[in-house]
Image (cartoon, rainbow, N blue to C red):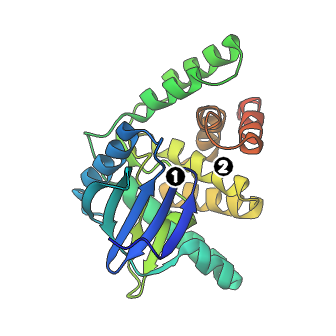
Amino acid sequence: MRLDRVIAVRNNKTVYRDGEKCIKVFDSDYSKADVLNEALNQARVEETGLHIPKIIEVTMLDGKWAIVSEYIKGKTLWQLMSENPHKKGEYLNQLVDIQLEVQSKSCIKLNRLKDKMLSKISQTTLDATTRYDLHTRLEAMPKHTKLCHGDFNPSNIIISEDGTPYIIDWAHATQGNASADAARTYLLFWLAGDIDGANEYLDLFCKKSNTDKRYVQKWMPIVAASQSVKGNEKERQFLLSWVDVVDYQ
């Protein structure tokens, strides 16, 4: 395989294109279990019928684990928003429609979102009382089994040349509560500095899914805490600041 055309560079991984193949190469110290879990997540989601790149193989290249999948030629929704700011509302509508299609699916072999969040909250630097409170809140939330992407944002949606939207990056996929996944998307807009986009997104999600906005907002401290164990220090401090927000009535 040729690794001479870089598509993207992320934390601990680099993505290349080789003809019709997309090759995600992980750093040598990246967890083998996490690589295999990501590939398994993607393979399982393939079975739902959603438009996603198909896994071709999992291999090693120069001592590094790599996931090889189909290359989807097109632009991300994030690129399209940047290039056509006057059409942002249209793209946000499309983003929510795609997310609702994802959440309409069931993938019962995936890990459970609540289990993952409970583990992540336990790993935070928060004091014991706050962790206990977050665990209690999480346990009280309704238990659902909807397909949740876990990192659903415009940069993970590729619009192909024929207009078909493809969803990429299934490393964090779980089954759980759709509103928790929406809370994560909202916070991702904030992390990107797009507060107006975050609010417009949330309004659209709640309207299209017939969900009370306050219900999604109740998830935000829980989701923020669980996400704070990864990322850089600036992101971590931002997410932890959401843990202290008052409950929405």
Q: Is residue 211 above or below residue 69?
A: above
Check the picture and name the quadrant holding the N terminus. bottom left
Residue hosting label 1: 151
Q: CA distance from mark 1 to mark 2?
A: 10 Å
Left or right side of 249 for 64: left
Q: Looking at the image, which residue is at 50% across and 55% down?
A: 13
Residue closest to the eye, 119 or 58: 58
Front: mark 1 or 2: 1
Query: The C terminus appears in which quarter of the rendering?
Result: top right
Determine which residue is flagged by label 2: 187
Which three-letter amino acid code belongs to the residue tagged 2? Leu
Q: Quadrant of residue 195?
A: bottom right
Circle nearer the N terminus (1, 2): 1
Q: Position of residue 245 (x, y in %)?
A: 76, 33
Residue 72 in the image: above or below residue 63: below
Residue in the image at 65% along x and 37% along y: 224
* Left or right of 127 in this view: 139: left
